[in-house]
Amino acid sequence: MFELTVAERHILGNPKMALFTVLSVALAVGVIVVLIGLTEGYKVNLIENTVENSPHVTVEPKEEEDYIYLYRTLTSIVDVYPEVLTASPRLIGRAAAKYKDNVEGVTFIGADPVQEDLLLRVREDIVWGDYYDLRFKRYAAVVGSDLADDLELKPGDDFRLTRQYVTIQVKAVGIIETGTGLDQTLVYLPLETAQDLLGEGDVVSEVGIRLSDIYAAPAIASDLNNKTRYNAESWQDKSRDILEQLDTQQIYSYIFYLLIFIISGFGIANTMIMIITRRTKEIGILMAMGADQAAIMKIFVLESLILGPPSVLLGGGLAYVAGKLIGNIEVPAEIYIANRMTVVLNLETFLFVSVFALLVNFLAGIYPAYKASRLDPVEAIATE
């Protein structure tokens, strides 16, 4: 099969041009995969922060009340629903944390450690210590990692929490890193300790509920509103703006993907057209030696098939390395939701982009080769 021999000699005879072709296709593949991975990563962070890092249903006080007083009774009502995995009474408030000469504003959450861990899987984010220590040590606290840095607080140190005229001293028995803006302000306390700091007695500010089916949240919230005078909201209700943002982002993402594909496609096509145009003289020589139009076309198709696989594999490697490097970039958690950029790299995206790149590479080579093959051999040879 002389076409394969000619294709191989074209590639080996001009390694710089072959390398340029491989790099151009690889770069296009890598850029598309990484950009799609960035948009998907933002979407994943948004969903995880909305669903996984917050209760699926939140029950708040009655309209005329600031706190929930009969929270044990309310919890027993909530536990009746078969979809409920756990219900965690929580007391949330603001205070000032002081260690040595450092003072920071904090958000404290008082809760039963077992129920709170079932609600938000707190222990998965603990980077030092044990969240369950709050069960046995009343004046203990688990502190956000950024807050600990700002206070220059080390594990095991004692620090003070002050709210209005109440001050308590607690020991840092754990450090938590959620990867969100909460790390700058979060302090977990035992429920009784938070109640002491608040000074309002045996109360909570909300009951957080985790469900086995997150899409059952609106129905359960509606039923609780009908059965009780408390204000129950599903995660969909509390995150309506975020969900609308997600829908809007999806539309913009498709437009963004389309533009990326068009720009990258033109880049690949321009490279292939330039390469084949430079070979017009070679095509004329082959035609003068007896090669017909079909043989000319086959040569360039074979070149695309030879150079295509290493191009997309190299592109996948570039995307993987770039994704890992980008994943180490720290960003403001209050803007990007997470404290590091996330690039979601999956096999489906890589395969889809690879097929696109190979197809464009193939089509971009056919047209100039077809046009050149229809030239008069004498004119093609005379082309500079």
Image (spheres, rainbow, N blue to C red):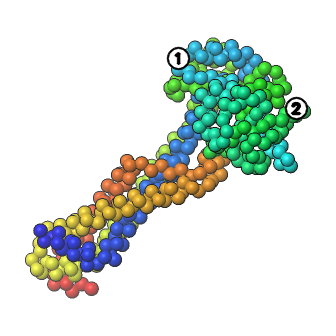
- Furthest toward the left, the residue is 290
Q: Position of residue 275 (x, y in %)?
A: 30, 74
Viewer-nearest of discs 2 and 1: 2
| Residue at the (74%, 32%) spot, across then down | 189
Query: In the image, which disc is placed on residue 82?
Result: 1
- Furthest toward the right, the residue is 165
| Residue at the (63%, 39%) spot, across then down | 126
Residue 26 visible within the image: yes
Q: Is residue 308 left or right of residue 379?
A: right
Query: In the image, which disc is placed on residue 166?
Result: 2
Separation (CA) of disc 2 from disc 1? 41 Å
Q: Against 150, is 165 above or below? A: above
Q: Amino acid at mark 1?
A: Pro
Category of crowding for the residue at label 2, using alpha-carbon neighbours closer than 10 angstroms: few (below 14), some (14–19), many (at least 20): few
| Element type where label 2 sits in the image | strand
Q: Is residue 214 left or right of residue 94?
A: left
The earlier-in-sequence mark between 2 and 1 is 1
Residue 39 visible within the image: no
| Residue at the (62%, 53%) spot, across then down | 331
Category of crowding for the residue at label 1, using alpha-carbon neighbours closer than 10 angstroms: few (below 14), some (14–19), many (at least 20): few
